[in-house]
Amino acid sequence: MLEITGLGKTYEGRGGVEALRKIDFRVDGGDLVCVVGPSGCGKTTLLKCVAGLLTPTAGEVRVAGRRVTGPPPGMAVVFQEYGRSLFPWMTVRKNVELPLREKKVPAPRRRELVEEALAAVGLADAAAAHPWQLSGGMQQRVAIARAIAYEPRVLLMDEPFAAVDAQTRAELEDLLLTLWRRLGVTTLLVTHDIDEAVYLGRRVIVLSSAPTVVQEDLAVDLPAARDQITTRSAPRFAELRAHVYAQIKQAKGRAAGDRTAGDRAAEESAPPRQVPSPAPRDLKRKTDGRTR
Amino acid sequence: MLEITGLGKTYEGRGGVEALRKIDFRVDGGDLVCVVGPSGCGKTTLLKCVAGLLTPTAGEVRVAGRRVTGPPPGMAVVFQEYGRSLFPWMTVRKNVELPLREKKVPAPRRRELVEEALAAVGLADAAAAHPWQLSGGMQQRVAIARAIAYEPRVLLMDEPFAAVDAQTRAELEDLLLTLWRRLGVTTLLVTHDIDEAVYLGRRVIVLSSAPTVVQEDLAVDLPAARDQITTRSAPRFAELRAHVYAQIKQAKGRAAGDRTAGDRAAEESAPPRQVPSPAPRDLKRKTDGRTR
Amino acid sequence: MTRREERAGAPMSAPRAAGLGLLGLACLFAVAEAVPRLGLIDPRHLPPATAIVRRLAAELGDADLWTALGETMRSWAVGLALACCLAVALGVLIDAVPGLRAATASTIEFLRPIPSVALIPLATLLFGAETGSTLLLVVYASFWQVLIQVLYGVADVDPVARETARSYRLGRWARLRHLVWPTALPYVMTGVRLAAAVAFILAVTAELVIGSPGLGLRIQLAQSGGAVTEVYALIVLAGLVGVAVNAVVRAVERRVLAWHPSVRGEVAR
Amino acid sequence: MSAAGTRPAGPLRRAALRLLRVLGLPVLLVLGWWIYSVAEPTFYLPTPGRVAGAFTEVWFSARITEDVLPSVGRLLTGYALAGLLGVGLGVAIGSSRALRAAAEPVLEFFRAVPPPVLVPLITLLAGLDTTMKVLVIVSGCVWPVLLNTVEGVRAVDEVLADTGRCFGLRGPARLRHLVLPAASPQIMAGLRQALSIGIILMVIGEMFASTSGIGHTVVLFQRGFAIPEMWSGIVVLGLLGFGFSLAFRAAERRILAWHLARGEERGRHA
Amino acid sequence: GNDGPAKGGGGTDSVEIGALSIVDTAPVHLAKSHGFFAKNGISAKITPVQGGANSAPGVVSGQFDFGFSNTTTLLTAREQGLPLKAVANGVSSTGQAGPGKDYSAILVPKDSSIRSARDLPGHNIAVNQLQNIGDTTIRAAVRKAGGDPGKLRFTEIPLPDMAAALAAGRVDAVWTVEPFQTQTVDQGARAVCWPFAEAVDNLSVAMYFTSEKLLRENPGLVKRFTTAINQSLAYARTHPEAVREELGKYTKIPPSVIDRIVLPKWPTEINRASVQTVADLARKDGILKRPADVGALLP
Ligand SMILES: Nc1ncnc2c1ncn2[C@@H]1O[C@H](COP(=O)(O)OP(=O)(O)OP(=O)(O)O)[C@@H](O)[C@H]1O
Ligand SMILES: Nc1ncnc2c1ncn2[C@@H]1O[C@H](COP(=O)(O)OP(=O)(O)OP(=O)(O)O)[C@@H](O)[C@H]1O
Ligand SMILES: [Mg+2]
Ligand SMILES: [Mg+2]
């Protein structure tokens, strides 16, 4: 479904910032892949290139075989800057409804989809409010509702649960899984929460810090049916998580120069968070991402 | 240092939204208190009332004994909408420097503070960039750098680490602790990460969902010296975490009406995240928050 | 959609933009040449573009023309600068002092539609001397343009940015300088562009009516002498001055608004 | 915080306060004018009393239907046309860099041509009747709308624009739901500018080849040295501008409700 | 200067004169270039204004010491209470009707059915200013020719734009003056009526004037100004080639046109009777509200 080959992006400002050096991976139709990596490594840039919002400076992205030059149809994006991605002049309901109108969904079905999506993110009451009357987490949930109501074939999400509390986050994660299973949406999700990446992803892609390449493409070999209790308490889950954590740490460590006191302290002390079992066990490493 | 008495806030829009009903607690000078609560329960509203940016509709806030009617001196705020709180027309360095100028810090000292703060958050290289040339996480770190460079007496932070990766987050947490210890800053921190709340906070305040009151004021009786490895692996840490999680779950559960399929699924399945030991053990509950 | 090309396409180089601009002017020239030549309008009343340009070239050789242009540009520049300073100062003041906006609204709306031309007798009465009168007219007309833009601009400050400034206790002056002014700047730039044209028009008109020396006087002389081609040549000169002024303002804008979405969308993407 | 400080005012007091706010400054100014004109009587600046006298005499007559109404009709037509043209062109030019580069010099060229010298050209093309007068109004009103629209469209928030693109917002829908609302604060600024410019150009258009209209009347008075009468005409222009701006503000409050409320809710306590 | 005339070195007074740059004002320019002002101890600065009505405020406010304006405008100003006094004749019609005889005429398109003043009622005539000397004299001419002046329709068009309006058929006839008369005739128009000449005998069309204040404070200067202008008027009358040469300097009239235009007459005396006639006509047309006191205006 998604093929990313030799993707590179250098921003022109500031004397040329190389956000992505060379990214190669593919996502099969109906797959759910999580992307993790250090802050500022180029995850958002990657997502925007896939969405056709940014022109790569090298390589290309293909969605369903077609080279991406603009946003492909049937794709929904949840932006990291959720607040700014909502239309302040529209109510919450209108915000969610607008893409459906553009998709020419008939009015009754549209209403249904909007109500369902808002209810699913727990915002049925806020439908008539304007985005700027909502809390940060509520705004983010509106953005999620807009994406899921759209029933996309490809779903790109940039830290979609960053602004909600732990409980809500768990609910939204499961909502995403349900939806993904029901509709078979090809999903690419950027997250900072390693647990979340392992819990949700069928694969986890770890990006290195700049110059950014794919540092690791990890298949999550947990049972397909997941739930918050059993999956998260599985020993394999802990292993995978620890492994990803170590990878990110390594990715960050690679970035020379900007190591500070705080940095060093953290590197020395921080363990894989909340993971007692430390060492990763025979992890099947993916080399080209095409196996799956 | 901070006294919040009978604080209530009802927004006028949408036929009157009661964001806060009645909040009472106090924070002693040099204390570090974390606030957690369901999404949309009024944490940001509370913070803004304390900061003197919103006029409460009931009750009052006192900082250092003086009733708050506008932003009190010596206070720094990190906003949840970090992106919009940076001035796009200034470089990162200028953004961090501006409050210092206003504070009439002499130029050499100012430069020193700015360099230090930027280095501490790992952005020494990005000083000359404009905020919109940075990634989300980097922007958030600029906002943090601005607050710590200011050397405030009171520090209010609204989900300050939401947009950074796990590794960076741990580093920033420790940075905050170091700073807090060194300068004795009275800190009120809103977070969604329960682990973070317990790891950082000397107390954790759990807000209920609307109508919002203080549901729990929990003293964190972990040793004062904390570090990412030992503190987080302490059994008491797990207990506290589980307790807070249960509290939030309860707080959310109380909100009637908007319970949906996803909601219910989550409630049934989600365990305290990554916490094998389930039941909280004899927790010292605070009733009025004045004991400490 | 054009927007996509703009965002995704290669940024346009300055020479290319200038080339396109020249192309636009060339099209205008072609139309202005064709209309009289095809007899759509009697060439005696609207001479063909080539004739106008030839006449303009001849005029440009005349030192007096340059003196006249200099006179006009001087009252233009002084008037515009005065109007901009006054309008920005008043606009910011109206924004900063609570209640002032409401108190001044009715007066502003009443005074704005009064044509500058109607004030000529009053102007001559108050100032007598020609420059004073011309300045009064120029300032009066262009002042409102900037003022209204400033009033809308200062109201556009991002609420979160405003709160940030407040929480760090930025003083009145610092807030003005670092928050309100940058926000209003794009509006002000538009206001200055609007006012620049209006000031130029009024400088010319005032000369035309009051008879102080300058480009307007030359236009009037040509008009009352029935020298049609020369009238159009001078009008073209006025237009070209407008184009030049705009180019300058745009260049300034690219520098001072480099951070703004409208400009940064065009340079680095 | 002001909200905490002020006592809740009764409706009567509020109304009185409002009246004071609307009329306070004008009354002061008129008073100043009065004192000046009495202290230093000059032919060209009559006392407000004489102007008021002339006002009732001149304007409470058939002039309302003969001069004022046709003028207002032309003004509204021209203004509406200019609004449509300015927003339409502005959106096109604002969203295409190539078009902007090509069109800007031409537009700037026309913008710099003084309307009084443009009028003869318009007459050549459109004749002497209402069409010409409306065109004169359009030729001046269109600029503030156009410029502001161009700038407003250029400044659309990138994240919003990206959102629109992702969800396939295109063509008229993009215009209606994204571009126009996002640019609306600036477009409104332009429309407000255009209102008073329209009145001024109404006068200029009527100075030319006219037999009726407010502008025509004012010019006749001015030429006939009927100075109080001329001032009364200027007062009519001012009142017209004031009246239109009231209507405009009401419309703006509806159209920019989201914008104003957002600023207010957060900014109230400032 | 606006502080009143200043006594310069060598016993000359500096004065500022507001006057249109048209054919009519040739004598004031001649007076300057041929030394009539200098001879009378005056150093003059001539400031071009647009329309005679605009020089009146300048004279009242003291910016100008002298102005040039047409008779109707001066009568109206006087009636409204402006303290103006005529000091010298400005320009007069030749008093002769017929093609190429007077410097002002009503022109119609070649194929027009209008043949004389009598045919004008019912048609749309362009004048440069409504309610001024143009429409008054046209009405009078029509009346004299036996037509109904009530049926005349007037449209205001600036003189430079009349030719185009006539060619495009926007109006049926235009009332114009030199150099536009010659230019419009060149473009195929035909003269049918000479209102100045037909309405009034030897009409004093315009005059030089000053304020009562200056007259009171510096009667000597005013007298010298009058003398200078009168000398120049006489010179202009007898030296048309000097006038044409002067026109080439202060106007932008194309040289080929200058050679052919009909020059007005420049008598040194104001024709008081014609002024009275214009006043009566203006009163009849409602331009003046009261019977005019011509004596108060004229010297
Ligand atoms: N400007 C406003 N106008 C009207 N209602 C508002 C406004 N701002 C916030 N609210 C409402 O107040 C309530 C509390 O909002 P607040 O932002 O304080 O929540 P929060 O606890 O910070 O949530 P989150 O964790 O999602 O950021 C919400 O129901 C929200 O809809
Ligand atoms: N518009 C821009 N102009 C110049 N540089 C940019 C721009 N946008 C991003 N960058 C740079 O590109 C790099 C990658 O940014 P990106 O937003 O993709 O990071 P990210 O992985 O999403 O980070 P985060 O997790 O913090 O959101 C950063 O160094 C950033 O400074
Ligand atoms: Mg990002
Ligand atoms: Mg919040």
Image (tube, coloured by chain):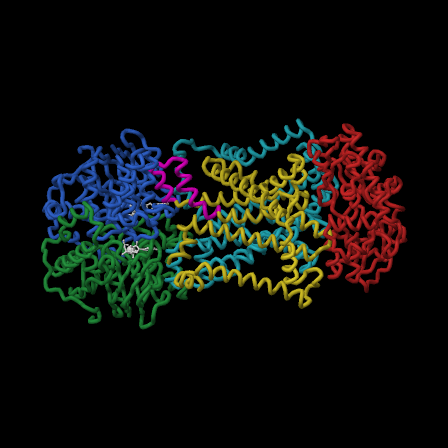
Chain colours: A green, B blue, C yellow, D cyan, E red
Q: Nearer the viewer, residue D149 or E163?
A: E163
Q: Is residue D62 visible?
A: no
- Above or below E294: residue B120: below
The quadrant of the picture occupied by the C terminus of chain D is: top left
- Above or below A184: residue E183: above
The quadrant holding residue D49 is: top right
Q: Nearer the viewer, residue E235 or B60?
A: E235
In magenta segment, residue C172: yes
| Left or right of A106 on screen, residue D66 | right
Q: Position of residue B3 (x, y in %)?
A: 26, 33
Q: How many tags in the picture?
A: 0
| Left or right of D33 on screen, residue B245 | left
Q: Nearer the viewer, residue A153 or A257?
A: A257
The quadrant of the picture occupied by the N terminus of chain D is: top left
In this view, the residue farthest toward the front is E10
The residue positioned 47% from the left and 33% from the top of the image is: D10
Q: Is residue C244 visible?
A: yes
Residue stretch in magenta: C159-188
Q: Position of residue C11 (x, y in %)?
A: 41, 60
Q: Nearer the viewer, residue C125 or C54?
A: C54
The quadrant holding residue C56 is: bottom right
Q: Position of residue D58 (x, y in %)?
A: 71, 40
Please name the predominant secondary structure of the magenta segment in the image: helix
In this view, the residue farthest toward the top is D39
In magenta segment, residue C52: no
Q: Position of residue C162 (x, y in %)?
A: 38, 42
